[in-house]
Amino acid sequence: MKLSRVRRKERIGERFVLLELEESGIAAQAKPGQFVMVRPFQEVFDPLLARPFAVLRTQGDSFTLLFEVTGRGTALLARAEPGDVLSVLGPLGRGFSLDASSGVLIAGGRGIVPLVFLALEFLKRTIPSLFFVGVRERKELALLRVLEGIPEVFWSCEEKVAGGFCGTVLDLVRRHLDAVFKSDAKVYACGPEGMLRKLKEIFSGREEKVEVSLETRMGCGFGVCLGCAVPKKGGGYWHVCSDGPVFKLSEVML
């Protein structure tokens, strides 16, 4: 584990917290789709296990996390303030492929995090992309703030909100399918498992060109505890931390 100092903290909406952490090694090495394991503070042992978080972006000697407060571990981490020191391990896992001629990015809720990093990398490499984001409630629309500077963003909300599409993000994607298929783009997605499962219906026959980032509970983050197993297509299991978290849609049983 490395020690990383909190440089900046920002609350986004009611449930999300953004932390910028100083750690030049992770900032230099992290790739879109990779994650880090974070322990709230050095002397805290309850909860005992570190929590996995996808990297939102890197900048100079720092990297940024964006997480939702969902339980005791994330609530404790949300109490960190600039100057506090956290224990961090990473970057870990297999990230997204970057060899696309164009990309279609599909995010559900907090699944936006690894895809923002990917969109920024595409922007740097002048790879065109369309970014679809969906949230359930209007109060989650605060997440759109992290998309500043990214072109071609389309958003949906399952509540009716002026200016956006009313429905799920996959309903929104279906409205643009002709453009997606014509471009022969690679598809990248992260979000709830139910959303990822439906991608098999939408992109039937194209699963090799769809990459999904899976979210699971992890104990270690590097393949020792085997607590993040998911069924492999054809039999056996993948371990999300060491084999993923990014897989081709054709590789996993969802």
Image: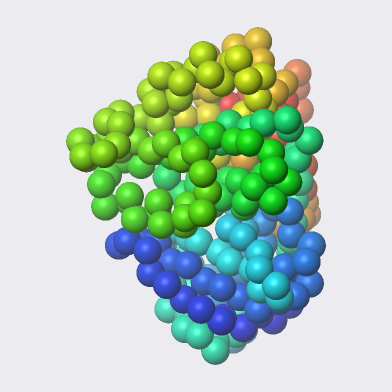
Front in this rendered view, residue 113 or 184: 184
Q: Quadrant of residue 36?
A: bottom right
Query: Number of marks in the image?
Result: 0
Q: Which part of the image, by quadrant, shows the C terminus? A: top right
Coordinates of residue 99 in the picture (x, y in percent): 78, 35
Q: Residue at x 21, y 39 (%)?
A: 162
Residue 100 seen in this snapshot: yes
Coordinates of residue 143 in the picture (x, y in percent): 40, 54
Residue 250 seen in this snapshot: no
Q: Which part of the image, by quadrant, shows the N terminus? A: bottom right
Front in this rendered view, residue 131 or 15: 131
Q: Quadrant of residue 164?
A: top left
* Position above or below: 191 against 167: below
Q: Residue at x 47, y 35 (%)?
A: 132
Coordinates of residue 127 in the picture (x, y in percent): 69, 38
Q: Residue at x 38, y 69 (%)?
A: 11
Farthest residue to the bottom: give it: 83
Q: Quadrant of residue 43?
A: bottom right
**How is the protein colored in the picture?**
rainbow
Front in this rendered view, residue 9 or 46: 9
Farthest residue to the top: give it: 205
Coordinates of residue 75 in the picture (x, y in percent): 41, 69
Q: Residue at x 52, y 71 (%)?
A: 19
* Position above or below: 169 against 139: above
* Position above or below: 41 against 187: below
* Position above or below: 117 against 229: below
